[in-house]
Image (cartoon, coloured by chain):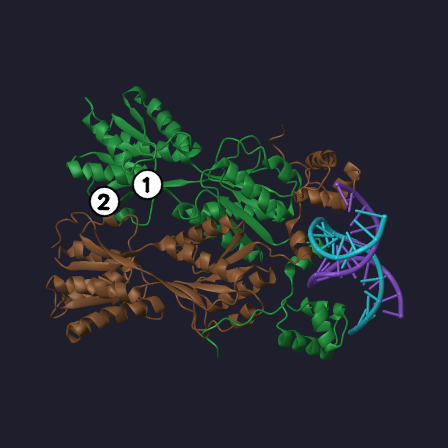
Chain colours: A green, B brown, C purple, D cyan
DNA sequence: TTGAAAGCGCTAACAC
DNA sequence: GTGTTAGCGCTTTCAA
């Protein structure tokens, strides 16, 4: 065996014509064998099979789908950043469903760039994917109208589309925020800080709205401190929390808009040895190792990807179904070291 | 705007023939416009462009690549589990490179199933991907020989291929383990425990070999404790560490084969309030939040994906290049709360 | 500069 | 049961 050098590249892959010639049959017989059609003489089938094996024939499924007019058996997933575990979990769940449908998954990251998002979509449509799963960024998905009308359906995950209707699978951000605040209120906290990431993101707006709703219902909205800590510098979140705690009348409890903010808050609180009740969004793998007791708003991330993919395949089969919107429930969980003994 | 119901699906997407008819030109002129050929009369080009926009024409790149014989501008990535941040980071880095080459990325997970891996590869080859990036599972990749000979190159990441040669990008697992052990020796530890995941994985074997080499060089190999803690139950790692610490002559330092084992070890050590020096493989996002000082062997995961993709595109362009193997260096870093004050 | 014809690899429709 | 023909949507070739 030659392990040191790549084999010289063959001029081209063998086609059905090559196989037919080699087996002494017509190309149509080769096609039938390749597609497992049963009405082929066993002896011929065997001869064709032998020729295929000898030549290393691999049916060109690109050509097959072109001629047959059947689907390409591919779907596209457009997310914000594949390296982010949240999105990659969605991707993995969607891929699982796709596999059940013998479909391959294109994955592409828009990187929070709306133009890049529409470029990716255009490219995938040119490749005639059967459908798209999109985590939309930016404030306008109306460019999708044309693609959807042309028969490439889209399903939206984590954020609803803007500028057009469509199926979506979302987290119950408002409800989650309300439950978290309700817990804090039940524990007797009346001065509560809310730290969010940039409110440009729909998700953050929803979480903030939910928190505000619950505080307002308790008549405590004007005692609350709302702070926006856009994630740019390494520890904006920690600094935001620091400022809160240094205020004239500091909050006794803080709700963090995502896990990055919660981590920053934990760091700051542990550093200064403060006793502040911490809660936050996102339940992550190492949350139970946080060196401070926290309560997190969690949700089943794989469900987002799974439902989205299932919704997409349903729409591919039944294009006329009315749009639907699925909401994934949230739960409250105690995490962090000494979770059993909160302050 | 109708937001409540999906638009009725058009019968089919318009083709160049439709555009040509609509613009009153030949199909070839449409083709030229679609491909940005400059030798087209500006007035005609404009007429064609208008027709394209009006009909919502999207060039079918599948058909284009079939006829032209040019590549499909797709590559396939076969990893073990897309939901695992390690692999999704590789995927994201590879996708970035692919984007530079105007190539779309198929991502598929083999789930540690060797048969599934070869099925995915076969499917991707049928789709005529330009090349493959593979994290191999199982003990035999010789099935790839045929595909590579037929002109679908493959590059291996994180684990070398077995049964055939090929380009690979690997972590310096042995070297990393040696550095970690050397650090422990320098700190005066002479009885060291090594806890690995299942040794079926090449990566774990390498790490164990590296640790053994360094211990042997110091003449301390027979004083070391090697334990295999295959990841099945929730806390095998914690239990393995517990047994070590309960032994007659317990180790004063432990090297963990991956971050899951390290987390389990930290949990166990914190629980019993023991003072054991902990080190382990993998530097992860929340490592600095571990409630116990540890030293980790880290490496730049994105480099794995980036180098692999670059290697693949080079091989696609220059198939005859001799195989190469790239090794990614490791580093040692102090992590965990109170990292400045190790026991 | 433009277009007609052929054909990429395969399958549908119809012979035989 | 098997083969022939045409054609999927596009690009190549070559003639006008």
**Comparing labels 1 and 2, the label whose residue is closer to the camera:** 1
Q: Is residue A29 above or below residue A316?
A: below
Give left or right: position of A152 versus A135: right
Q: Residue at x 51, y 44 (%)?
A: A78
Which x, y percent locates residue A80? 45, 42
**Element at badge 1?**
helix
Which residue matches tag 2? A339
Q: Earlier in the sequence, mark 1 or mark 2?
A: 1
| Residue A300 visible in this rendered orientation of the protein | no
Which residue matches tag 1? A259
Q: Residues within 10 Å of mark 2 (few under 14, many from 20)?
A: some
Please give the count of numbered marks on the rendered protein: 2
- Quarter holding the C terminus of chain A is top left
Q: Residues within 10 Å of mark 1 (few under 14, many from 20)?
A: some
Q: Residue at x 33, y 25 (%)?
A: A215
- The front one of A35 and A312 is A35
Q: Residue at x 55, y 41 (%)?
A: A119
**Element at badge 2?**
loop
């Amino acid at each position: 065996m030659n392990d040191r050098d790549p084999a010289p590249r063959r001029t081209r892959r063998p086609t059905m014509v090559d196989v037919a010639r080699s087996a002494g049959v017509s190309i149509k017989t080769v096609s039938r064998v390749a597609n497992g059609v049963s009405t082929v003489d066993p002896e011929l089938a065997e001869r064709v099979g032998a020729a295929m094996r000898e030549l290393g024939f691999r049916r060109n499924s690109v050509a097959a789908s072109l001629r047959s007019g059947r689907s390409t058996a591919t779907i596209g997933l457009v997310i914000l950043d594949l390296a982010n575990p949240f999105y990659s979990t969605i991707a993995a769940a969607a891929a699982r469903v796709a596999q059940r449908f013998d479909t391959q998954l294109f994955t592409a990251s828009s990187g929070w760039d709306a133009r890049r998002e529409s470029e990716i979509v255009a490219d995938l449509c040119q490749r005639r994917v059967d459908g798209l799963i999109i985590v939309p960024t930016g404030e306008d998905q109306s460019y999708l109208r044309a693609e959807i009308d042309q028969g490439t359906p889209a399903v939206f995950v984590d954020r609803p589309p803007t500028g057009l209707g469509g199926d979506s699978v979302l987290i119950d951000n408002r409800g989650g925020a309300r439950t978290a605040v309700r817990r804090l209120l039940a524990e007797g906290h009346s001065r509560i800080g809310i730290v969010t990431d940039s409110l440009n993101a729909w998700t953050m707006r929803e979480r903030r709205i939910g928190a505000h709703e619950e505080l307002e219902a308790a008549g405590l909205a004007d005692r609350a401190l709302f702070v926006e800590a856009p994630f740019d510098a390494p520890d904006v979140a920690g600094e935001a929390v620091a400022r809160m705690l240094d205020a004239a009348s500091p909050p006794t409890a803080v709700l963090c808009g995502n896990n990055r903010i919660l981590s920053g808050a934990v760091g700051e609180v542990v550093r200064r040895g403060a006793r502040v009740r911490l809660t936050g969004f996102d339940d992550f793998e190492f949350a139970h190792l946080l060196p401070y007791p926290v309560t997190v708003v969690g949700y089943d991330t794989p469900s987002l990807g799974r439902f989205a993919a299932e919704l997409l395949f349903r729409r591919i089969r039944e294009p006329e179904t009315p749009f639907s919107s699925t909401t994934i429930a949230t739960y409250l969980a105690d995490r962090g070291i000494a979770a059993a003994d909160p302050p």
